[in-house]
Image (tube, rainbow, N blue to C red):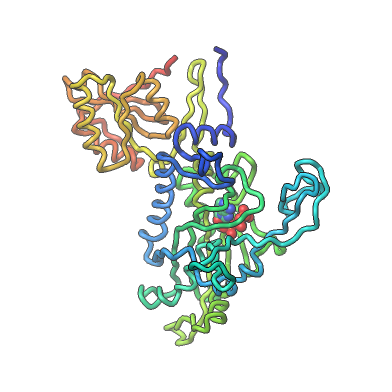
Amino acid sequence: MAKQVPGRVTMEKLTSLCQRRGFIFPSSDIYGGLSSCWDYGPVGVELKRNIKEVWWRNNVQERDDMVGLDTSILMHPRVWEASEHLAQFSDPLVECKNCHLRWRADELKGDRCPSCNGELTEPHQFNLMFKTFMGPMEEAANVVYLRPETAQGIFVNFENVVNTSRKRLPFGIAQIGKSFRNEITTGNFVFRSREFEQMEIEFFVKPGTDDKWFDYWLEERFNWYVKLSIKKENLRLREHAEEELAHYAHKCYDIDYNFPMGWSELEGIANRGDFDLKQHMTYSGKSLTYLDEESKEHIIPYIIEPSAGVDRSVLAVLCDAYEEEPDKDEIRVLFHFHPDLAPIKVAVLPLSRKENLAALAKDVYADLRPCWMVQYDDTQSIGRRYRRQDELGTPFCVTIDFQSLEDNMVTIRERDTMNQIRLPIAALRDTLQAKLAGEDLFVLPEGGQIWKEEKHA
Ligand code: ATP
């Protein structure tokens, strides 16, 4: 067989690996898929959950100035009048008169159809909100919308949260949830889909302190991705030009990631001023002011919004962690996931299925499972099993061999270095715990050994 040469990540390679290993499948696959909707498989669901959990831990659990919320997808239709989504949340749509494909006019390079070079229609504004009906009657009075962002659920609960959480300015409300947009052009895998998840923070501050807080969140959010091992050189900040700013925004930056198709938005950070609370005050007739204890005045807080996409974060993490390494004449494909994000933390691999060995391996497995997502695999050669775990991005494999029955020792094999350490079973859980927490100062337990894995043919 010809020698394989390692290459860079491409969307084709990623999509295919994600399907083959159970990260992400097309929605309704057996029916040929549903355009731009995706299902997260047994491994992908863990990766996605881990991203959301780390975000929640860092932004809610570990902060004094943040609370969480989980609001409904369907909201009162007046919300979308107040937010101006009904009037403004649209893209200019053009259709090819020849092949009838539709395009976003603002994304086209020329004035002809990119597919067949046909003539295009004049653009018309197309609202991106999905419409449905509440109750049994499909009539105009019962129209409701699937939310196109989670933010509005936070704004309309501002008063509820202030009254119940004893939070004083500055403080934030965080939410993770599904949003829906009837995008005209989709594609690039999960980058742009019609159903997706957002992780949004609305951070309420005193007017006049908003610039300071905007800079704070810009830095905080950029560093969050770096902390999750995304390479700094693949991240950039891009300020929106005046004409690009949304109608509500005083200022906006995107955190872009260098995806295989080029630099594209991962997260948007906007200074929304007092637009949202003011609009909801006008449309609901309720006061959403905040009593400033210092000045004894009622003020309308300004809002800084870091708004991230869960699916785009999944994609960025996958792209960034993907690597092909030479392995004799073949290539080793692996994901260098940060341990907090790795879908499976540990794989338990008995060298054979022999009864006494399996019993010991099952004991080890049972001991580790309460701590982490652990996979048990006793099929095929050990080399193949290591490679399979590399493709899942599993940081550690624990191998149980016949010697283990004699000396109660097992081998930990590390994904990134391919180092192997032999250590007593009694020290296994603590050692894995330390290694998953990224502790470099690893103390080899008494009787332990360390060596490097031979690359297999
Ligand atoms: P774009 O310019 O790419 O359409 P946007 O500026 O409209 O994005 P925002 O309204 O700022 O996006 O939404 C905040 C975040 O939600 C984005 O940074 C992105 O991560 C995510 N997001 C928005 N639309 C989609 C989508 N169609 N599919 C997946 N994620 C999305």
**Residue 279 horizontal/vertical position (percent):** 57, 77
**Residue 395 horizontal/vertical position (percent):** 38, 34
Residue drawn at x 35%, y 75% as measured from the top left: 164
Figure check: 220 above or below 336: below
Figure check: 372 above or below 166: above
Q: Is residue 330 left or right of residue 101?
A: left
Q: How many numbered discs sit on the rendered protein?
A: 0
Residue drawn at x 45%, y 65% as measured from the top left: 72
Most foreground residue, 420 or 383: 383
**Residue 139 horizontal/vertical position (percent):** 57, 70
Asked if one can make out residue 417 in the rendered structure from this viewpoint, the answer is yes
Most foreground residue, 398 or 284: 284
**Residue 291 horizontal/vertical position (percent):** 45, 83
- The quadrant in which residue 392 appears is top left
- The quadrant in which residue 89 appears is bottom right
Residue drawn at x 35%, y 38% as measured from the top left: 345
- Residue located farthest toward the left when viewing the structure as drawn: 406
Figure check: 207 above or below 377: below
- The quadrant in which residue 280 appears is bottom right
Q: Quadrant of the C terminus?
A: top left
Asked if one can make out residue 267 in the rendered structure from this viewpoint, the answer is no
- Residue located farthest toward the top when viewing the structure as drawn: 1
- Residue located farthest toward the bottom when viewing the structure as drawn: 296
Residue drawn at x 36%, y 26% as measured from the top left: 419
Q: Quadrant of ligand 1?
A: bottom right
Most foreground residue, 395 or 146: 146
Q: Quadrant of the N terminus?
A: top right
Figure check: 325 above or below 303: above
